[in-house]
Amino acid sequence: MNEKNHSEIGKALNHVLRPMLAAFVQKNLAQHFGANNWWQRGVLDVLYPEQKRFLPASGTYEELTERLDVGLSALLIDIHWRDIFSLKMPRNAFNWVKELKSIRNAWAHDSESFDDATTIRALDTMALVCESFDAETTEQLRTMWSSKLNRQPEPVEVVKPVQEPLPLTGNLKSWRDVIEPHPDVAHGRYKQAEFAADLAQVVRGEGSSEYVNPVEFFSRTYLTTGLKNLLVETLRRLTSGNGEPVIQLKTSFGGGKINQLLEYFTTYYYMPRLTDKSVLLETVRKGVAERTFALSDDEDLTHELKFGDISLREISTESFLVKSSVAQEQLKIKSPDPPKKENGDAGTDPSSPSTLSPPQPLLPKHFSMDVELDKTRLNKSFNACIDEVASYLMHLPNVSVSIRLAIDISASEGIPEDLKEVISENCHTLKVRNFYFEN
């Protein structure tokens, strides 16, 4: 059975998936690096010597595309994921491509590893990878997957002995004695129609208080990690533009999709519901004082721009907020050329207000951190460092980013030779430049 499964996986990899995957990779590399440079810059320049030792230095489009087998194509998607393929494939495809690399390596080096369950999983992974760029190939892979799934033997029904119910001890309390219902439920004031939120009413500020009042809404809503991340991504998109432009909600019915939309409305419609205008005015004053933006009395910026410390009396409902960069350019335009001295030498009058420019704050130009990750939750700890710290800085203009990972493992009984070879090969694949074993 394993030999038949191995043959079926080989057919799916090399005859069904490979042509379309290679064409997809070549097309996107050519679009990014240029039709004449995609092979050199997108393939040869990013591979280690041992990874490209059998690849040609040049060739025709057909010849070079033919050299992109499934393993190399998956590796190139992995290497160029952030700059190229994350824009062409769904986020989950990154994990599917990783799994595809493992499937291809297992097929090439271990013909005994494909039992029926592994074969079904492999065909499903191939179809998931292919979904974003070729529907016809996806259908072929799905047909193979379905055929393999339907050939599975019927599971053996295990009849478990019927257990007699445990006798009640008389100490089990009723749920009414354990929890207290919400007052609306206890007093019969709730309306079943309000269980399904009307988003139009939320936009208009109508409806019951638990839907239109943010404080009431969030006091009755448990924020899971997924909902928090969703709000963070949305806020990033609305402010800096760095958040995800499209968020696919896959939650099943009753799982919170309406709640997610309600959170957007209650969060981003909150400004008009400020209880005190002084909160907003104080926020504007601080922004101008910290030079986050400037203040102008007219939209055309013909009046004097206000930068630095200002009083609340200088802010009105007719004021305009101006980006710091725009304000700086405007100040340069309005500053006249310095007067020339009689002997022709250029000179300036330091007391002239027209030549004065606002002092620029000294901004830090380097950030570094050193953190010990929780070994029991490595993925979560690492992703938290990237998402909550590094990602904010990585989107700055002209930024240079270097992220290094230090791993120190001691095995008191020694590291087996075969495991050492596997680790060394994986380190080369991951472009780990400095690694060593020692006694």
Image: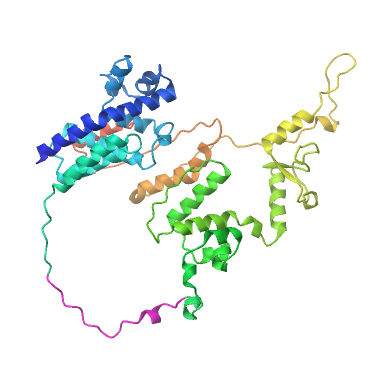
Give the vertical position of 331 relative to 121 (above or below).
above
Q: Quadrant of residue 86?
A: top left
Is 251 rendered above or below residue 85?
Answer: below
Q: Quadrant of residue 362?
A: top right
The location of residue 104, given as percent across then percent down, is 23, 34
Q: Position of residue 373 (x, y in %)?
A: 39, 47
What residue is rendered at 39% in x and 48% in y?
Answer: 380
Residue 50 lies in what quarter of the image? top left
Magenta residues, start to end: 161-181
Look at the image and tell me in which quarter the C terminus lies. top left
Query: Is most of the magenta stretch helix, strand or loop?
Result: loop
x and y percent of residue 382 in the render?
A: 40, 45
**Residue under the image location 68 percent in, 46 percent down:** 287
The answer, for residue 122, to whether it is visible in the render is no
Residue 249 falls inside the magenta stretch? no
Is residue 51 at least partly visible in the picture? yes
Q: Residue furthest bottom?
A: 170
